[in-house]
Image (spheres, rainbow, N blue to C red):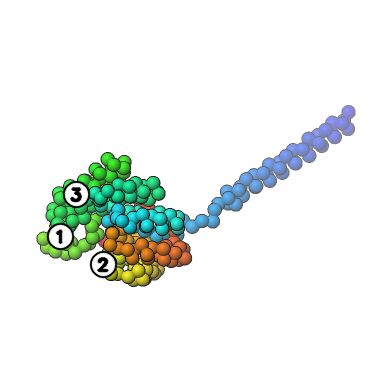
Amino acid sequence: MKDLLKIFLSMVSSFIIILSMTNVQAVKVHAMVPEEMTPLVKSKEDQKFAYLTFDDGPSLNTMDILDILDRYHVKATFFVKGNEEPYAKEYYQEMISRGHVIALHSYTHDYSIVYRSTESFFQDLNRLETMLQKEFGIKTRIVRLPGGSNNHLRHQAATKPIINGILQQLSEKGYIYFDWTIDSTDGISPSISEQQIINSVQKGTKDQKHVNILLHDINSMKNTVKALPDIIEYLKKEGYNFDTIDETTPKIQFN
């Protein structure tokens, strides 16, 4: 009987030791899982990002621009104005349905109206907001001022207080305005060549991780469309990821 008891106790002891070792091993394995499963991905701050932004659309070039963006699986941000031409409603909708971001530029893009006074600026902007929300359900607080926040009127005595007042009220009213880090120069004149546009973008990316590129969606700017594939291919080759602008995007402001 004593011998049976010894055998039983010995078996119980062995079982406890084995079970203990198994649990320790299990704990060790479990502890290794998070480290093994951690993806080796850089944080967004360490990655290179490019924001393609198109001002002044929609235009007769919009569909070509959208088709090129689709071809390269790239999304862009369109700072639109109010276009009352028959084709425009379809093009606004195409921007939305293809997954791009629509943001505010101005309704008229007429400096004599937009920058007549602070009140005139917001009347024009609110006209665009109302149209976009009523027709397409778009509500956004992202703005780009015509000519940017540091346009030539900012340096004239008569209009400097107006621009400063606009910038202050944009902040107070909860808008976020965005300028750019690279001017493609395509908005200067239709005579700006395709290669000059490409060169301007390439030069502007030097030593830059995050680039916000100013392009234009204007009827007369045919060379923007021609340059766009080369711009995208260059940015991809340089390791840039493409993103659209929202309220969490790092601000790019001249002031």
In three-dimensional space, the C-alpha distance between marks 2 and 1, rounded to whole angstroms, equals 26 Å
Task: Work out whether residue 35 or residue 78 is closer to the camera in this orientation and state it.
Answer: 78
User: Residue 52: x percent and y percent?
Assistant: 36, 58
What residue sits 31% from the left and 56% below the top? 60
Q: Amino acid at mark 1?
A: Lys
Q: Which residue is mark 3?
A: 124
Within the image, what quadrant is residue 157 found in? bottom left
Q: Amino acid at mark 3?
A: Asp
Task: Work out whether residue 66 or residue 123 is closer to the camera in this orientation and state it.
Answer: 66
Work out whether mark 2 precedes mark 3 in sequence or the reverse, and give the earlier one: 3
User: Residue 114: x percent and y percent?
Assistant: 17, 54
Tag 2 secondary structure: loop
The answer, for residue 110, to whether it is visible in the render is yes
What residue sits 24% from the left and 56% below the top? 145
Work out whether mark 3 precedes mark 1 in sequence or the reverse, and give the earlier one: 3
Marker disc for residue 160: 1
Q: Which residue is mark 2?
A: 189
Marker disc for residue 148: none
**Is residue 155 placed above or below 81 in the rendered structure?**
below
